[in-house]
Image (tube, rainbow, N blue to C red):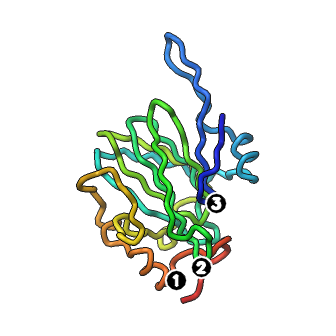
Amino acid sequence: MKVRPLTIEGAFEVTPVQHRDSRGTFLEWYRFDALAAAVGHPLDLAQANLSTSARDVVRGIHFADLPPGQAKYVTCVAGAVLDVVVDIRVGSPTFGAWEAVPLDDDDRRAVYLAEGLGHGFCALTEGATVAYLCSSTYRPGHEHGINPLDPALGVAWPAAAPVLSTKDAEAPTLAEARAAGLLPRYPGRSRPSK
């Protein structure tokens, strides 16, 4: 397993070793020890999620309150998505920057993102199925979003007409979320005051 840091601190691309033969493929898509060695701490698992999306669906950009936040380990088990990590941590040297990693059922890459980072993806195929391992459980009222079409972020979603949930379409821009005091601080212990 190869773990490579992305340009946003706390985000990593994970490429597994695949063993293929006439029967099919076997791989370790998550290794506790390999990830912990690369990121410097273990990923405590508290919840696993699975989503299936139609082509051109954009989900995100989502994040959770700090503390405790929610680290995620994300892979695409069927189809393909463009996975996007956004640095929403006020005071970070890469605040407002984003990085995209293609995830699919061929290369079987995964993305790890630390607590305090924003996450979203765009389905590139029909029935794109994404699995997430999460460090904390869903906490209503402590989960937030940034509008994925915020022009100030300028995420290059690969969809001519992105399909959004009502919640994501009505989410604030990064500037609005910052002004409302919703964003985590860098390195991230609590939300900044207004």
Q: Residue at x 39, y 39 (%)?
A: 80
Note whether 193 is above or below 71 in the view shown.
Answer: below
Provide the residue designation for mark 1: 181
Q: Residue at x 55, y 47 (%)?
A: 111
SS state under label 1: loop
Distance between the alpha carbons at the discs numbered 2 and 3: 18 Å
Picture mark count:
3
SS state under label 3: loop
| Sequence-first tag of 2 and 3 | 3
Q: Quadrant of residue 147?
A: bottom left
> In the rendered image, which quarter contains the N terminus?
top right
At label 3, the amino acid type is Glu
Q: Residues within 10 Å of mark 2 (few under 14, many from 20)?
A: some
Nearer to me, 157 or 50:
157
Note whether 136 is above or below 109 in the view shown.
Answer: below
Note whether 130 is above or below 135 in the view shown.
Answer: above
Q: Which mark is residue 162?
A: none
Q: Residues within 10 Å of mark 1 (few under 14, many from 20)?
A: some
Q: Residue at x 62, y 71 (%)?
A: 92
| Sequence-first tag of 2 and 1 | 1
Q: Residue at x 44, y 79 (%)?
A: 175
Provide the residue designation for mark 3: 9
**Mark 2 vs 1: CB contact within 8 A:** yes
Note whether 124 is above or below 140 in the view shown.
Answer: above
Judge depth for marks 1 and 3 and give the one in front. 3
Q: Which mark is residue 191?
A: 2
**Mark 2 vs 3: CB contact within 8 A:** no
Q: Horizontal and vertical percent for residue 27? A: 59, 27
SS state under label 2: loop
